[in-house]
Amino acid sequence: MPKQIELAELIEIARKLDPEGGPLRSIADATVRGVEALMQALGEAVAERLGVECTQAEYDSPDFGGICLPFYARQVGQPCPPELMDYDSPEWSAIDGTDLDHKTGKEI
C-alpha cells in the first residue's frame, strides 16, 4: 500500500524540508494561497446558497484541519443548515460570536 498524503500534510512536509524559504517553501506557500483563494470563492457561493456567512479561508496544520473555511449563522436563532451539520463538531455560532445550539439556533 502506498502512503496517501493529504494536501495539508504535503504542505507541512515541504515546509519542514525547506524551513528557510527556499524553492519547496515557495511552492508550498503558493499552493496555500491558491487553494485558499479557490476555497474562499466556493465557500462564498455555498454560504450564499445556504443563507449563512463565511469568513476567510485559512491554512492551519493538518492536526487542525489543513485549509479550512468557517461558516456562521447570519443571526441568533438560525440553525445550522443540514448540508453543514455532519461536518466538524456540533459547534455553531452566529457571525457576531454568539454560541448557538446547532439544531435550533437558540443561544446557549
Image (cartoon, grey):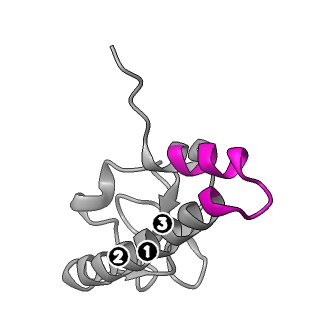
Q: Distance of mark 3 from mark 1, alpha carbons?
A: 5 Å
Few, some or many residues within 10 Å of mark 3 (<14, 14–19, 20+): some
Please state the extent of the stretch shown in magenta in the rendering.
10-24
Do callouts 3 and 1 mark residues in contact (Cβ within 8 Å)? yes
Few, some or many residues within 10 Å of mark 2 (<14, 14–19, 20+): few
Identify residue type, mark 3. Thr
Percent x, y of residue 10: 51, 45
Residue marked by disc 1: 34
Residue that appears at 43% across and 85% down: 75
Mark 2 or 3, nearer chain start: 3
Q: Left or right: 27 with respect to 37? A: right
Image quadrant holding the C terminus, namely bottom right
Residue marked by disc 3: 31
Q: Nearer the viewer, residue 94 or 42?
A: 42
Determine the residue located farthest toward the left in the rendered image: 49
Few, some or many residues within 10 Å of mark 1 (<14, 14–19, 20+): few
Identify residue type, mark 2. Leu
Q: Residue 84's quadrant in the figure?
A: bottom left
Q: Nearer the viewer, residue 105 or 65?
A: 65
Q: Left or right: 96 with respect to 51? A: right
Q: Distance of mark 2 from mark 3, alpha carbons?
A: 11 Å
Q: Secondary structure at mark 1?
A: helix
Q: Per the image, is 15 magenta?
A: yes
